[in-house]
Amino acid sequence: MIRAFVGYVTVIALVGCGGGGPSSLEDDRPSVVATTTIVGDLVRTIAGPEIQVDVLMGPGIDPHLYKASAGDVRRMSGADAIFYNGLHLEGKMSEVLARMGERGAVTVAVAECLPPGELIALQGFSGMHDPHVWFDVNLWAGTIGCTADALAELDPLHAEQFRKRARAYSEELAALDAWARGRAEDLRADQRVLVTAHDAFSYFARAYGFEVRGLLGVSTAAEAGTSDVQNLARFIVEREVPAVFVETSVSPRYVEALQEAVSARGFVVEIGGTLHSDSLGGPDSSASSYVGTVRENVETVVTALGRE
């Protein structure tokens, strides 16, 4: 099976790493650590109250650049399982996650549960794929079964509850996917041009009929040069794109520089809003869940690009 499961059969914590994790004497539920808010929301939705879920990265944190602290390592070491996106999204944590698996921890890379044929290959990087799979709602739904199975292995007594929630969540995401397709179709084909800070929206483009351009690469570890800004500015002017978008987990300076370059060419492009790319919104926002984030992103895009 794909390397989403390391040490899948037996659930054990790292040897000699007691304490410091999410478990406590007062709470004997199995404990899980998730890397990103998006993965954490997936796991929490299916786990329900039977599993403790701890998320390492808060809202607005960029997983491409995130480095695990000593405290993070302790939290992961004390957990019964670690859920992460995979496909190198958590780039600077890859070595830590690999070591955890090698030492016997259960690690579940949810995006690597998806069929390889449905992943978007990265140009110039043999064997690597775009990790931003959650932007295609129907594709992201494919991680539900994998997650439910891993939780059932972790806590067999509540396996049926996990699978019941998984079925309900699959239905919810099917409805969300249909809604997103309908909203996208409110735009003419020539209006569906999405320009963002980094190239995170290829799955969104493929699923909902958009053309996308990102100033940075798939990973925010890249830097945009002057030629990148000027080339994208030229594209915006030629296509008369009315709005570009900043992202919660990427500095707005890149898009602001792009906006200035467009203005220097005699064209006005607005900042159409802020999109949640690699993270959900804050706990009190309408984007605090995956479903809420998709709805907010789609509404922001369609509203801004639909202006005449």
Image (cartoon, helix red, strand yellow):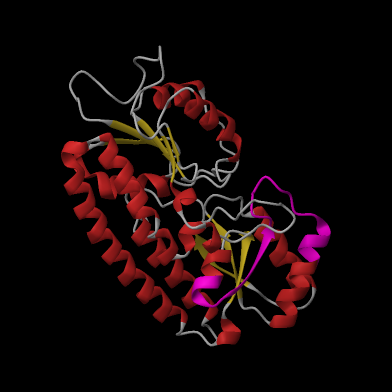
Q: Nearer the viewer, residue 159 or 241?
A: 159
Residue 4 x %, y %: 46, 42
User: Could you tell me which residue is drawn at 41 percent across and 52 percent down?
Assistant: 281
Q: Residue furthest top?
A: 16
Pick the residue in front: 189 or 43. 43
293 in the magenta segment: no
Disc count in the image?
0
Span shown in magenta = 206-230
- Going by the image, does 299 lie left or right of 160? right
**Side of 54 relative to 198 (left or right):** left
**Position of the C terminus by quadrant:** bottom right
**Image quadrant in which you'd find residue 82:** top left
**What's the residue at 29%, 62% (across, down)?**
170
Q: Is residue 288 visible?
A: no
Residue that extends furthest to the front in the rendered view of this protein: 1
Residue 138: percent from left, percent from top: 41, 66
Residue 269 visible from this viewpoint: yes
Q: Residue at x 40, y 74 (%)?
A: 180
Image x and y of residue 12, in percent: 35, 24
In the rendered view, tell whether residue 203 sits above or below residue 250: below
Q: Decide if residue 40 is on the left or right side of residue 27.
A: right
Foreground residue, 78 or 14? Answer: 14
Q: Residue at x 61, y 78 (%)?
A: 242
Q: Position of residue 189 (x, y in %)?
A: 56, 86
**Drawn side of residue 188 relative to residue 5, left or right:** right
